Image (cartoon, rainbow, N blue to C red):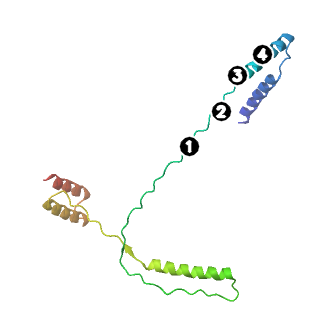
Amino acid sequence: MQSLKFPAMICVCALVFTASVRADDNAAQAAARAAVLAQLAQIDAATPTPAPAPAPIISAPVIKPQPAPVQTLVVTEPVVSQPPTVAVITADDNAAQARARAMLAKEQVIVTQSTARTTSFLPVNAPALPISGSKETRLQALNEQYKSGQISPQDYFNQREAILNGN
């Protein structure tokens, strides 16, 4: 890897050296360069600078509040209120420490009350199957055979397909 870095460094040094070495201009070249620079200065002075475009007015998007989803909760156990915890205030506590202890005691009461609640959701009834009652009975019997290990998975799926196709 070192052998590749050395020639690359030599090439870079050679390019930098040749770019930095430049012969001085003769009188004709210096006069021509001065004339070109004078013409460029005249063009720059004659060209009016355009006024900057006014900044676009950006309005903030209007965000409409979305209504909160409605959830139904059923409380299955009555809430049992716990006796409040008494904060112990010692003689060496200052006022800030006493307030902090009292706030902690209130928080413990709230946590205790909230954990006493048990909520459950109402069961969702599945829609009726789009098959006849006899097919449903045959499918349930086939499912029981499969769960008990009486038939193989391949047999289960073949028989299920036959029942659903009406055979």
Residue assigned mark 3: 47
Under circle 2, the secondary element is loop
**Disc nearer the start of the sequence (4/1):** 4
Residue 26 shown left or right of residue 67 in the figure: right
Dot 4 or dot 2: first in sequence order is 4
In the image, residue 98 sits, relative to residue 165, either above or below, namely below
Taking the image as shown, residue 42 lies to the left or right of residue 161, namely: right
Question: Marks 4 and 2, how far apart in space?
Answer: 29 Å
Name the residue at 67% across, 79% down: 96
Say whether disc 2 or disc 1 marks the residue closer to the N-terminus: 2
Residue 89 spot, x, y in % from top left: 64, 87
Q: CA distance from mark 2 to mark 3?
A: 15 Å
Labels 2 and 1 touching (C-beta < 8 A):
no
Q: Which mark is residue 58?
A: 1
**In the rendered image, which residue does mark 2 sit on?**
52
- Eye-nearest disc, 4 or 1: 1
